Image (cartoon, grey):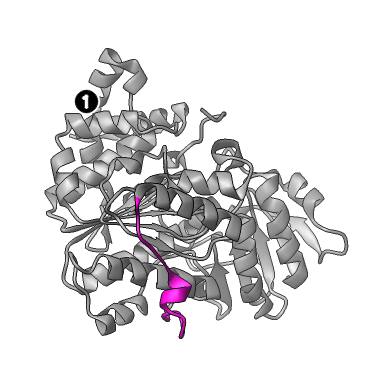
């Protein structure tokens, strides 16, 4: 029976970080007898710097709208670990997550004892948990989001029906490379012969690298903007970048239509009812003001955020980030459009200190001051930050903590992935 011991064990697994490489996940799949099922189950595999979570949610929604039982694996979660594992659009309840983790504990211990180099990481264990849950639930379609990169990501043990690359930007350079082309090559590692590729918006240097890999493997491809040259499909998620994600998602579903037929009208209706929190999520506060929560957290995300912030009248912006390379471009955008800035530290060991955030603000920025998330969001439905609207940006961890406080729910900060300290 799962217990607090299971939770402590899971938390302890984070200490080893998320190590790149597919050999540990391949061993898990072999020992769990999942390979034949993985080969037989239609799968969408999605990589990208930004937009992959939204695109996965859109693909899943389209497939579910056609009456198929879906399994969606994404990471990281916002509030609770069960959000990573959605069956038919519904996250796994915490008791089931812990029970399934406990069931994997003996296997983890056996591998650690017999083949330490193949001992699964926290992320790999959650990926295995997802696949087992999806198989047991009879899922007919899988939608898998890569965790980091693609080529060496644990999800790359799958056998995709269609692959998608949503975007390429400079992020996680210490793991994926220092140039757009190098990062693109890592993301393109999800390409497999026989699985066509759906492309979102990529810089020319990055697209050339992805298409070079596609040519090597004989993988056909299509671009979302070319397929929908008359207008990208609409979605209820706000922002021009989400229209690109919708186009990439619908294109991916079309490329899989020989195996998974779709109706265009049904698919487009599904894109207008996507439930994917912390993507310019508008939340009415109890006092009548508007709160917006957005998880844009890197340079490319900041560019997508700018037109949305520009559409507001000098909002109060709550900012928290992880790392200077992410914080600087985000703060530059915020400074151009905010009336007041509140600097906070997200609930993660990688949080950029408030004093450092203040030092990264460009000259002439609006008034900025330090704050604490607990003070700004003291009770369910309440926000103590001044101004209207209030916008929270900068980190998935920050978005998750804010949403948890607004809902009055516990926040699984201790069950987020940790990155290894160096590139393999």
Query: Looking at the image, which residue sits at the far top?
Result: 114
- Position of 11 with respect to 256 (left or right) is right
Identify residue for label 1: 107
Residue under the point 46% across and 48% down: 187
Seen at 78% across and 60% down, the residue is 368
Mark 1 nearby-residue class (10 Å; few <14, some 14–19, many ≥20): some
Tell me where residue 153 appears, x and y as whole percent: 40, 40
To which quarter of the image does residue 272 belong? bottom left
Q: Where's residue 225, x and y in %?
A: 47, 74
Say if 311 sits above or below 343 in the image.
below
Residue 345 percent location from the top left of the image = 64, 48
Q: Quadrant of residue 422?
A: top right
Q: Is residue 367 shown in magenta?
A: no
397 to the left or right of 267: right
- Numbered disc 1: secondary structure: helix
**Which residue is most to the right?**
364
Residue 224 falls within the magenta-colored stretch: yes
Please report the bounds of the magenta region as a residue range. 218-234
For the residue pair 75 and 391, the one nearer the viewer reads as 75
**Looking at the image, is 380 positioned above or below residue 322?**
below
The reply to whether residue 220 is visible in this rendering is: yes
**Residue drawn 56% across and 29% down?**
421
């Amino acid at each position: 029976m799962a217990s607090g011991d299971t939770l402590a064990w899971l938390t302890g697994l984070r200490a080893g970080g998320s190590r790149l490489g597919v050999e540990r996940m391949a061993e898990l799949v072999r020992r769990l007898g999942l390979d034949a099922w993985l080969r037989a189950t239609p799968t969408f595999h999605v990589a990208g710097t930004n937009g992959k979570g939204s695109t996965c949610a859109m693909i899943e929604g389209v497939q579910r709208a056609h009456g198929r039982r879906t399994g969606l694996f994404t990471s990281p979660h916002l509030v609770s670990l069960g959000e990573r594992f959605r069956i038919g659009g519904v996250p796994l309840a915490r008791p089931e997550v812990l029970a399934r983790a406990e069931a994997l504990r003996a296997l983890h211990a056996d591998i650690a004892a017999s083949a330490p180099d193949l001992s699964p990481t926290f992320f790999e264990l959650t990926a295995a948990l997802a696949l087992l849950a999806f198989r047991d639930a009879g899922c007919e379609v899988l939608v898998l989001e890569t965790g980091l990169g693609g080529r060496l990501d644990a999800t790359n043990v799958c056998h995709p029906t269609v692959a998608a690359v949503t975007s390429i930007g400079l992020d996680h350079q210490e793991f994926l490379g220092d140039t757009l082309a190098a990062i693109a090559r890592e993301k393109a590692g999800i390409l497999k012969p026989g699985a066509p590729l759906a492309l979102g918006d990529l810089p020319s240097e990055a697209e050339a690298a992805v298409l070079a890999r596609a040519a090597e493997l004989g993988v056909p491809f299509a671009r979302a903007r070319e397929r929908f040259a008359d207008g990208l499909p609409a979605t209820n998620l706000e922002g021009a970048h989400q229209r690109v994600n919708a186009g990439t998602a619908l294109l991916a579903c079309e490329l899989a239509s020989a195996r998974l037929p779709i109706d265009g009208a049904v698919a487009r209706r599904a894109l207008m009812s996507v439930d994917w929190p912390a993507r310019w999520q508008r939340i009415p506060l109890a006092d009548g003001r508007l709160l917006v929560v957005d998880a844009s957290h890197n340079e490319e995300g900041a560019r997508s955020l700018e037109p949305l912030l520009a559409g507001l009248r000098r909002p109060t912006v709550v900012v928290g980030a992880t790392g200077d390379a992410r914080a600087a471009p985000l703060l530059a955008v915020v400074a151009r459009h905010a009336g007041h800035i509140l600097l906070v530290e997200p609930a993660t060991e990688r949080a950029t200190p408030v004093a450092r955030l203040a030092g990264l603000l460009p000259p002439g920025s609006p008034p900025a001051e330090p704050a604490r998330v607990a003070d700004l969001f003291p009770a369910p439905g309440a926000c103590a930050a001044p101004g209207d609207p209030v916008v929270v940006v900068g980190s998935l961890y920050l978005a998750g903590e804010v949403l948890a406080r607004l809902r009055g729910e516990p926040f699984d900060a201790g069950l987020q992935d940790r990155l290894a300290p160096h590139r393999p």
